[in-house]
Image: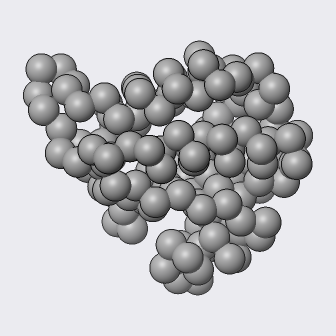
């Protein structure tokens, strides 16, 4: 799977690791899975790590709108959701992907119904510091983002 998701319920953190070709369908499947796996997903911070080999080139502006709308969907299974309020740190190792993520975060800036905060980083340590994660959490995340053998 091009997007691996790790839930750290104790630290209210979702870690998403992107590798290889990532399609809009991959991202929408992850969003659906996140809702199923955790009732508190609307309030959990996110740490997105886009590895140097992550390829978001199949994702265009229309796809970004669909992804944003899917994340911010207000009614899930007939139940009204609370306002989204999370921080999302993106560590992006490719200039092309940086532009795509920048466009995605700009879409959220116009959303007056939700209050997530997005920030792009060049280094993992900076992103984790911004998310207020300690060394124990950082060590756990390092294991998750390490490339497979």
* 93 left or right of 15 in image: right
In the rendered image, the vertical position of residue 137 relative to residue 134, given as above or below: above
Of residue 10 and residue 62, the one placed in the foreground of this image is: 62
List x then y, in percent, for residue 21.
80, 25
Find residue 26 and report its image quarter: top right
The quarter of the picture where the N terminus appears is top right
Of residue 8 and residue 95, the one placed in the foreground of this image is: 95
List x then y, in percent, for residue 97.
79, 42
* 49 left or right of 107 in image: right
Residue ID at (77%, 31%): 56
Report the number of numbered marks: 0
Q: Is residue 148 visible?
A: no
In the rendered image, the vertical position of residue 89 relative to residue 23, given as above or below: below
* 38 left or right of 21 in image: left
Of residue 113 and residue 75, the one placed in the foreground of this image is: 113
Of residue 59 and residue 131, the one placed in the foreground of this image is: 59
List x then y, in percent, for residue 119.
60, 62
* 6 left or right of 96 in image: left
Residue ID at (40%, 34%): 71
């Amino acid at each position: 799977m091009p997007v691996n998701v790790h839930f750290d319920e104790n630290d209210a953190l979702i870690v998403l690791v992107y590798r290889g070709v990532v399609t809009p369908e991959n991202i929408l499947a992850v969003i659906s899975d996140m809702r199923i796996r955790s009732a508190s997903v609307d309030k959990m911070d996110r740490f997105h790590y886009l590895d140097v080999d992550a390829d978001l080139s199949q994702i265009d502006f229309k796809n970004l709108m669909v992804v944003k709308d899917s994340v911010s969907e207000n009614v899930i299974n007939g139940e009204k959701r609370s306002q989204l309020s999370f921080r999302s740190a993106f560590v992006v190792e490719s200039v092309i992907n940086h532009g795509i993520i920048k466009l995605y975060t700009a879409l959220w800036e116009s959303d007056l119904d939700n209050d997530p905060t997005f920030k792009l980083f060049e280094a993992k340590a900076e992103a984790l510091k911004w998310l207020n994660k300690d060394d124990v959490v950082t060590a756990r995340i390092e294991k998750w983002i390490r490339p497979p053998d």
